[in-house]
Amino acid sequence: MKQFNELSARELFEIYKLRVSVFVVEQSCPYQEVDDADKAAYHLVLRDEDGIPRIKMTLK
């Protein structure tokens, strides 16, 4: 689990790409997914045995 400023550019890109894919594209929710809450949150990225990522964002 990392805070925003601990994420690499690659990790942050992967998180945003997955969130936009799920919440904006798949769920047809065209709203601002990336916002200032990301900077105050903890981020967790896990992968299953097939390499499929799972993400969780927890606010402080």
Image (cartoon, helix red, strand yellow):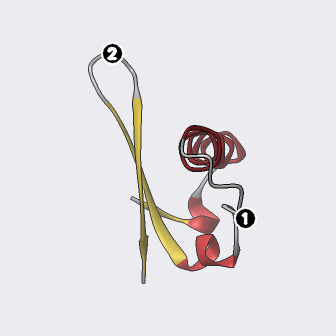
Image point (62%, 46%), residue name: 28
Where is residue 55? Give x, y as percent. 42, 48
Q: Is 14 above or below relative to 57? A: above
Closest to the observer, 60 or 1 = 60
Residue designated by label 2: 50
Q: Residues within 10 Å of mark 1 (few under 14, many from 20)?
A: few
Which numbered disc, 2 or 1, marks the residue that appears first in the sequence?
A: 1
Select label 2 or label 1 by which is in front: 1
Residue designated by label 1: 32
What's under tag 1, amino acid-wise? Gln
Residue 42 found in image quarter? bottom left
Q: Is 38 above or below relative to 18? A: below
Image point (42%, 84%), residue name: 60
Closest to the observer, 20 or 56 = 20
Quadrant where the N terminus lies? bottom left
Measured Cα–Cα span from mark 2 to mark 1 = 30 Å
Judged left or right of residue 3, residue 5 is: right
Where is residue 44? Give x, y as percent. 40, 54
Question: Element under label 2?
Answer: loop
Image point (70%, 71%), residue name: 35
Where is residue 15? Give x, y as percent. 58, 46
